[in-house]
Image (tube, helix red, strand yellow):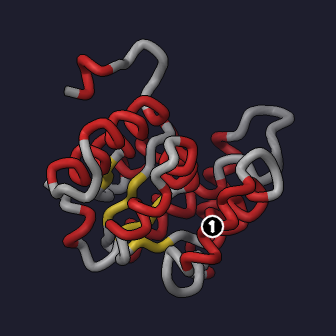
């Protein structure tokens, strides 16, 4: 089993960060994962979202988290990423649709690090490319077990990150 905190590096997708933000738990996430990184595509998406209803994403800059510069896809993966985006985007989708998930899965595979990603496309790419992956819900369980957050705070994130109808019983 992957322990995100013990890894040298973990790549986070946008949705994971937004889930923690919506639950009011972004600062504990940043404190728990000093080894987190994001791809350039995820960074661009986070900055775009900070200009919308997720203005609190500006906290990431103040925290200087994730540390370091966003990671760009190497040139030899750019064509793969674009082909996957075109293949998996519905007609009329935003031009940047799925870029973060694809870049996260591809780069995690290249770097041989774990990805924390929830969306179906990202999960599928991680599985087919044999990339170690955690979901937000699994990360929350790890954080609660490690004492980084309490069970009630963990449930707040779990509740945001899981589908409608999944509740406290599944959490416990």
Q: Quadrant of residue 22?
A: top right
- Could you say which is closer to the camera, residue 57 or residue 6? 57
The x, y position of residue 41, in whole percent, is: 66, 66
- Could you say which is closer to the camera, residue 29 or residue 106? 29
Q: Residue at x 34, y 75 (%)?
A: 9
Residue at the farthest bottom position:
68
Residue at the farthest right position:
92
Kindly state the secondary structure of the residue where label 1 is placed.
helix
How packed mark 1 is, by other alpha carbons closer than 10 Å (few <14, some 14-19, many 20 or more), is some
Q: Residue at x 61, y 57 (%)?
A: 100
The x, y position of residue 126, in whole percent, is: 38, 51
* Residue at the disc numbered 1: 59
Question: Which quadrant: the N terminus?
Answer: bottom left
Instruction: Please give the count of numbered marks on the rendered protein.
Output: 1
Q: Quadrant of residue 35?
A: bottom left
Determine if residue 101 is in view: no
The x, y position of residue 115, in whole percent, is: 38, 59
Left or right relative to 157: residue 3 = left
Left or right relative to 80: residue 132 = left
Q: Residue at x 58, y 85 (%)?
A: 69
Q: Quadrant of residue 47?
A: bottom right
The x, y position of residue 142, in whole percent, is: 21, 51
Q: Residue at x 26, y 63 (%)?
A: 4
Question: Which quadrant: the C terminus?
Answer: top left
Left or right relative to 39: residue 28 = left
Determine if residue 97 is in view: yes
């Amino acid at each position: 089993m992957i322990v995100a905190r013990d890894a040298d590096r973990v790549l986070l997708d946008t949705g994971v960060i937004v889930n923690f933000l919506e639950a009011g738990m972004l600062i504990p996430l940043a404190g728990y994962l000093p080894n987190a990184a994001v791809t350039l595509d995820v960074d661009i998406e986070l900055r775009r979202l900070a200009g919308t209803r997720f203005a609190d994403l500006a906290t990431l800059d103040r925290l200087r988290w994730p540390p370091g510069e966003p990671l760009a896809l190497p040139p030899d993966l750019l064509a793969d990423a674009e082909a996957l985006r075109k293949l998996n985007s519905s007609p009329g989708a935003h031009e940047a649709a799925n870029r973060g998930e694809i870049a996260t899965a591809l780069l995690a595979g290249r770097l041989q690090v774990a990805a924390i990603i929830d969306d179906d496309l990202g999960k599928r790419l991680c599985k087919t490319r044999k990339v170690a992956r955690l979901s937000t819900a699994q990360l929350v369980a790890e954080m609660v077990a490690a004492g980084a957050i309490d069970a009630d705070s963990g449930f707040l994130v779990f509740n945001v990150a899981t589908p409608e109808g999944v509740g406290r019983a599944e959490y416990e």
